[in-house]
Amino acid sequence: MVLRPASLESLFPGIAAQSRDGNVFYRLPGTLSSDLPERGALPMLAVKLLEVFVRKAAAPAIRDLAVELEDKQTGGRLGLHIVADDFSLKNGDLVAVDNSPYLLFLHGTASSFEGAFGDLRGTDTWNSLRKMYGDRIIAFQHRTLSESLYRIWWIWRANCRSMRNCMW
């Protein structure tokens, strides 16, 4: 069902409309007003049902967009990687041969290793970190929009098992 502005006005008198980029958006109230003498839960229920159906219908498309953004940001390179001298991510076995610590780069929400730490490339700070940690600099690239923290933790744990002193 498509609601036209005229039908929205009849359902929600005084509805606020916002214009953005040539499109008009309406903010629906949480309740419906009625001229009927009875005041029951039906109007509120109708708005909540509309909200639930719209969210459920939109959820797969939103998740697909989130995955697409994450793939674009990470270049599809997810998991635990060794950070090379040139700041590129390399696959390899992360086996600790002694008790020397690793430096882990862990990006935040809606980002990637490059997006969060790319400004370090070629700096004195990067050179100092490379001298201090050598080949023990790693990055964990993960999905932050389409995966739960619990799932990210399980992925980290699976990637981390090959390291003797890995904390999880």
Image: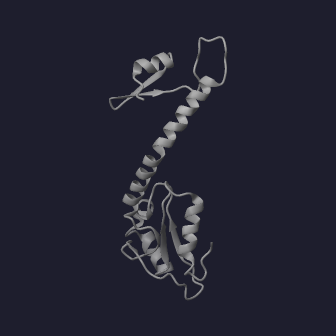
Residue 21, compared with residue 96, is above or below; it is above
In the image, farthest residue toward the left = 22
Depth order, front residue of 109/146: 146
Question: In this rendering, is residue 94 above or below 20?
Answer: below
The N terminus sits in image quarter? top left
Residue in the image at 46% along x and 51% along y: 63
| Picture mark count | 0
Q: Position of residue 2 (x, y in %)?
A: 40, 28
Q: Quick check: 34 left or right of 18?
A: right
Q: Nearer the viewer, residue 125 or 50?
A: 50
- Identify the residue at image location x=55%, y=25%: 29
The front one of 75 and 86 is 75
Residue 122 picture quarter? bottom left
Q: Position of residue 70 (x, y in %)?
A: 42, 57
Name the residue rendered at 62%, 12% in the picture. 36
Q: Is residue 88 left or right of residue 105?
A: left
Q: Describe residue 21's horizontal placement relative to residue 99 as left or right.
A: left
Task: Tell me the quadrant of the picture where the C terminus can be found.
Answer: bottom right
Examine the image and state in which quarter residue 120 appears.
bottom left
Q: Residue 92 placed where, x, y %?
A: 44, 81
Please say which color scheme the image uses.
one colour
**In x, y percent, where is residue 96?**
55, 85
